[in-house]
């Protein structure tokens, strides 16, 4: 499997889009969620190795496309966390159409 290309830069936010995705039962097709990468999480990822950056981006893309990943809702917040090894991606879902990444942290610093 080839790594996904980096998200496109749209103004101050990285945005990725994809077409419809059907589940394996052939039921109703659903549109994949759009992913936004504002400035703050991009700054969090700036000094990370490129292989780790690709892994984190692919994890968010997989969640947006298939709902795959270890995701839990954060208590007392309208945010979620996606676990990728020892890294945590904090994000929110806006209008059930957009996954907005808020922060990217090592496990000990995420909460």
Image: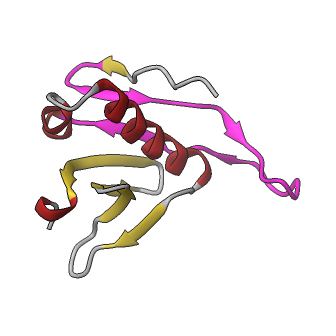
In the image shown, does 47 or 28 lie closer to the viewer? 47
Residue in view at x 33 percent, y 35 percent: 52
Rendered location of residue 24, percent (x, y): 83, 54
> Where residue 59 sits in the image (x, y, percent)?
46, 45
Residue 49 position in % (x across, y down): 25, 28
Quadrant assignment for the C terminus:
bottom left
Does residue 82 appear to the left or right of 69 in the view shown?
left
Position of 3 relative to 105 (above/below) = above
Residue nearest the observer in this picture, 67 or 77: 67
Residue 58 shows up from this direction: yes
Q: Which image quadrant for residue 12? A: top left
Residue 80, quarter of the rendered image:
bottom left
Is 3 drawn above or below residue 63 in the view shown? above
Residue 19, given in percent of the width and then of the height, sits at: 65, 32
Q: Is residue 26 left or right of residue 101?
A: right
Q: Residue at x 87, y 58 (%)?
A: 25
Magenta range is: 10-38
């Amino acid at each position: 499997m080839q790594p996904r290309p980096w998200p496109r830069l749209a103004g101050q936010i990285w945005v990725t889009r994809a077409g419809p995705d059907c589940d394996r039962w052939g039921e109703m097709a659903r549109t994949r969620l759009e992913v936004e990468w504002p400035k703050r999480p991009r700054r969090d990822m700036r000094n990370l190795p490129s292989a780790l950056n690709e892994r984190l981006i692919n994890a968010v893309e997989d969640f947006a496309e298939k709902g795959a990943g270890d995701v839990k809702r954060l208590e007392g917040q309208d945010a979620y966390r996606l676990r990728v090894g020892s890294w945590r991606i904090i994000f929110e879902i806006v209008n059930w159409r957009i996954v907005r990444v808020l922060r990217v942290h090592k496990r000990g610093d995420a909460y």
